[in-house]
């Protein structure tokens, strides 16, 4: 039987969780205490969050890190280090601000001077006020001058048709500009413009003191000031206790007025620039002759802007990859540690500027894992519309795709998760969020966050444990053990994904395109896992048996969705792959080349036709459409593993599904660590019944292999047992223990019908204890409506903990024929007490148990 499966069944799986630990310079006792609390959750690694530390890479930092490494070694834990003192990565612990000018962030800026022809014998002040900001009338603001250098002056004719402005007859006149910045030029009849392009230092105000991703030696400042000092002090721990470094949302950040704005090429914004970009742009757009195509970065040029925009974005994103991601990744590899992290992926940031990196796959190329994050209520159950279409149907797929296609990542994809959802984020929502990631290919996690700061730490809550004030911490180990079990089963395996959607970055630079999330929505709602494939990787692919093979991936079909234009080279690559037997589907439109030419023999299919074409790619086939049923498939040695998850937190799933053929199947409830016999129907379909947010795994394989698994010592439960349910009647004695004294219960009163605790105790957070009695034996207790993790005790014996639906407890070994004492304790979040802004952006759930409790007994034959 597969080694990983056996290890999980025997409780010997490895660790795949490394939560942030916010460091503020706390005392030694607190640092060791935090490591203990992390370890107690079943977590064997930590990522040190340096941002709030008062002395990063200074004496106090080394003092604290000495303590944390010592404690990690005692606990057999590993340490990852976030690689800068400020957020986002790139500040280089302040060293970038002191760097030579050529290693700082420069940006291309544009000034347009209208010219109404005919004009003869006139001079134009195209570059006379370098270093000053212009206002409407061309006067300078008398402030300190900034560094600015002339790049080019371009003349062009302005044509307006039906309100659309285009430029033509472009001419590079830079060589005619005098040393004083004057241009003398005649213009014939018509409307013209003079475009002045300068390279300016400090154009992106929010990130001026950061390294330049376009200069290799600038990125080396980060290595020299952060990575190297850690290596010099702890080289003996590299690759052992110290596992690696984590970069948090590095990017271009080139907008002048906002840190997190989206910048699309063609918008009016400063563009990251260096002298080498000038050389490369000239070569790619004019064979090295001139810079006449520069206006295409900001304006329409009768189609020629497509070439300009593509050339520029291609240049700078490749520089980002080589200078930043690859350089840091290579340094880590040479020093026997790993490099992980993520960029800003949200929506269109994965393929644009502003806070983005222009090209997600290039930005992560040097890392040893794929990486994404989810924060700020961007992913919520049921909210798969508007911006939610990206987080539901694309975000985790991005991370899984880059990990699958780059062999050095070994299929590992990390998600920074749970952060900045507010104090009201409880274990049930966290479990749902983790399921959403795992059932889409994520298999490593960085939970956000633990802290060494006094409670309440307001920095992007929730803060786990919260110095003993988090009521749900006592059950947090249930969640993290669950995540580790599934991640151990998935790591080292092969994700079986048949469909790839083409990454549209280059198309979005040149014209209209569409996010992969739209095809992804169709796929995932019909149990068809998919991944995203960029052209850089497609160039390396081989066609084998009709499959497009790259890295560890082998796709049966590539979907190119709604892309208006692509470089002619890309169309030629598609053509060659099709000739070798690859299946490529163009959806809604066949892309044209940069010059507008098309492959006449190609045709597009409409999106609604795809589902029929993709029938054979479905992992399972429900008897009825199941929008919220998610399914993912991993191949491990000797076993196929399917993960099923109900992605709805309001609707149950009750449907028969057709499965891939297998000699034997065994179910595994990884949350409760229980194996079960699936409910197989006479027609070989599996009857699938999933509660709100419920998930499970299915092992499929040969009879001999899975028989060995069933004999590994774990109890095998049945899904087909029919139960008779009765409502519990009587009164419940209720006691409350506040979050700050969780073992000190005070009687509140009695209730016959349970309702929201907040109805009778405003602003309560802590532990709610319900006590009652019932007569006679029972097999199962069911809490139909429970908000918060619950622990059940019958006659003084614990019957387990449930942190999410179904809240069903096996009480068969604890009940007697006489009177039975029942005690239930439910832990709340801190949301009702602290009411932070992020919590108040979501509906505040009821607190405690609502409605009726049910007792279940097996039906007699």
Image (cartoon, grey):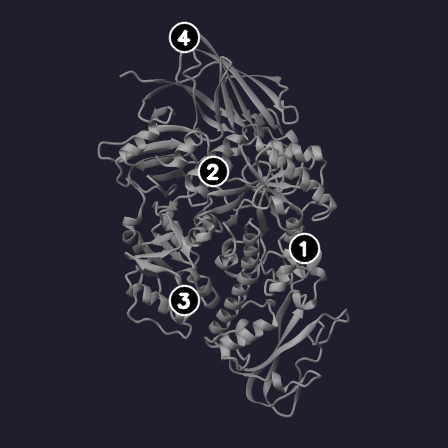
Question: Mark 2–mark 1 contact, CB under 8 Å?
Answer: no
Q: Earlier in the sequence, mark 2 or mark 4?
A: 2
Q: Which residue is at the far top?
A: 818
Sequence-first disc among 3 and 2: 2
Residue where numbered disc 4 is placed: 817
Pointer 1 residue: 225
Q: How far, Cα to Cα, is label 1 from label 3?
A: 44 Å
Q: Is residue 453 left or right of residue 423?
A: right
As drawn, the residue found furthest toward the front would be 236
Callout 4 crowding tier (Cα within 10 Å): few <14, some 14–19, many ≥20: few
According to the picture, the residue beneath numbered tag 3 turns out to be 564
Separation (CA) of disc 2 from disc 4: 38 Å
Q: Mark 1 or 3 closer to N-term?
A: 1
Q: Are marks 4 and 3 in contact (CB under 8 Å)?
A: no
Please tell me which residue lies in front, 603 or 83: 83
Tell which circle, 2 or 1, labels the residue nearer the N-terminal end.
1
Label 4 near label 2: C-beta < 8 Å?
Answer: no
Secondary structure of the residue carrying tag 3 is loop
């Amino acid at each position: 039987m597969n080694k990983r499966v056996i290890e999980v069944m025997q409780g010997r799986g490895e660790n795949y969780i490394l939560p942030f630990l916010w460091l503020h310079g706390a005392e030694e006792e607190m640092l060791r205490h935090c490591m203990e609390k992390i370890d107690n959750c079943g977590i064997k690694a930590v990522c040190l969050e340096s941002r709030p530390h008062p002395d990063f890479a200074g004496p106090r930092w080394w003092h604290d890190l000495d303590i944390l490494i010592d404690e990690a070694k005692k606990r057999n834990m590993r340490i990852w280090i976030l690689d800068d003192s400020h957020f986002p990565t790139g500040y280089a612990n302040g060293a970038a601000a002191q760097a030579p000018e050529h290693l700082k962030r420069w940006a291309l800026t544009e000034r347009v001077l209208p010219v109404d022809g005919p004009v003869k014998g006139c001079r134009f002040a195209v570059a006379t006020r370098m270093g000053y900001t212009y206002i409407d009338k061309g006067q300078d603001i008398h402030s300190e001058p900034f560094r600015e250098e002339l790049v080019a002056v371009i003349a062009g004719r302005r044509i307006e048709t039906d309100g659309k402005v285009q430029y033509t007859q472009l001419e590079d006149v830079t060589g005619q500009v005098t040393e004083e910045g004057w241009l003398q030029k005649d213009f014939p009849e018509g409307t013209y413009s003079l475009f002045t392009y300068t390279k300016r230092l400090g154009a992106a105000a929010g990130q001026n003191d950061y390294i330049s991703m376009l200069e290799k030696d600038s990125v080396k400042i980060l290595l020299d000031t952060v990575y190297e000092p850690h290596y010099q002090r702890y080289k003996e721990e590299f690759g052992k206790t110290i596992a690696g470094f984590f970069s948090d949302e590095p990017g271009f950040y080139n907008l002048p007025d906002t840190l997190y704005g989206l910048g699309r090429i063609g918008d009016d914004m400063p563009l990251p620039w260096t002298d080498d970009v000038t050389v490369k742009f000239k070569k790619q757009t004019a064979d090295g002759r001139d810079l006449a195509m520069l206006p295409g970065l900001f304006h329409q040029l009768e189609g020629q802007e497509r070439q300009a925009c593509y050339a520029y974005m291609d240049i700078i994103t490749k520089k980002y990859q080589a200078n930043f991601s690859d350089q840091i990744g290579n340094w880590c590899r040479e020093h026997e540690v790993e490099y992980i992290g993520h960029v800003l992926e949200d929506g269109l940031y994965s393929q644009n500027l502003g806070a983005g990196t222009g090209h997600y796959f290039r930005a992560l190329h040097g890392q040893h894992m794929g990486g994404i994050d989810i924060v700020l209520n961007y992913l919520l159950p049921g909210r798969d519309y508007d911006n939610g279409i990206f987080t539901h149907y694309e975000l985790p797929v991005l991370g899984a795709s880059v990990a699958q296609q780059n062999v050095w990542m070994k299929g590992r994809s990390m998600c920074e998760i749970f952060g900045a959802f507010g104090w009201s984020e409880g274990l049930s929502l966290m479990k749902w969020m983790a399921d959403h990631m795992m059932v889409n290919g994520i298999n490593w996690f960085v939970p956000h966050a633990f802290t060494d700061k006094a409670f309440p730490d307001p920095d992007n809550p929730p803060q786990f444990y919260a110095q003993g004030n988090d009521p749900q911490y006592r059950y947090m180990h249930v969640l993290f053990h669950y995540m580790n079990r599934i991640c151990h089963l998935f790591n080292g395996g092969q994700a079986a994904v048949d469909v790839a959607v083409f990454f549209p970055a280059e198309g979005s630079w040149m014209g209209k395109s569409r996010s992969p999330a739209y095809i992804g929505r169709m796929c995932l709602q019909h149990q068809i896992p998919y991944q995203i494939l960029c052209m850089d990787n497609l160039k390396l692919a081989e066609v084998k048996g009709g499959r497009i093979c790259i890295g560890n991936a082998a796709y049966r079909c590539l979907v190119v969705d709604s892309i208006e234009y692509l470089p002619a080279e890309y169309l030629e690559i598609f053509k060659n792959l099709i000739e070798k037997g690859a299946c490529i589907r163009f959806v809604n439109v066949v892309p044209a080349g940069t010059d507008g030419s098309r492959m006449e023999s190609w045709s597009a299919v409409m999106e609604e036709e795809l589902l029929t074409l993709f029938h054979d790619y479905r992992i399972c086939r429900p008897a009825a459409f199941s929008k919220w049923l998610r399914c993912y498939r991993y191949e491990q040695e000797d076993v196929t593993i399917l993960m099923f998850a109900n992605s709805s937190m309001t609707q149950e799933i009750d449907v028969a599904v057709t499965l891939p053929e297998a000699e034997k199947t065994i179910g595994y409830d990884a949350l409760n660590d229980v194996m079960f016999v699936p409910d197989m129907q006479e027609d070989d379909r599996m009857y699938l019944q999933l509660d709100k947010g419920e998930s499970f795994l299915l092992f499929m394989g040969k009879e001999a292999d899975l028989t060995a698994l069933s004999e590994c010592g774990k109890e095998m439960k049945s899904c087909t047992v029919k139960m008779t349910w009765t409502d519990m009647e009587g009164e419940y004695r209720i006691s409350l223990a506040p979050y700050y004294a969780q073992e000190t219960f005070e009687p509140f009163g009695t209730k016959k019908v349970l309702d929201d605790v907040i109805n009778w105790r405003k602003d309560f957070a802590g532990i709610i204890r319900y006590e009652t009695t019932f007569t006679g034996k029972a097999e199962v207790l069911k809490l139909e409506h429970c908000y918060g993790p619950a622990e059940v005790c019958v006659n003084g014996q614990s019957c387990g903990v449930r942190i999410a639906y179904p809240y069903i407890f096996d009480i068969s070994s604890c009940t007697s024929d006489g009177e039975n004492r029942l005690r239930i304790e439910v832990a709340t979040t801190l949301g009702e007490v602290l009411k932070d802004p992020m919590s108040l952006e979501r509906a505040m759930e009821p607190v405690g148990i609502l409605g009726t409790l049910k007792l279940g007994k097996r039906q007699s034959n």
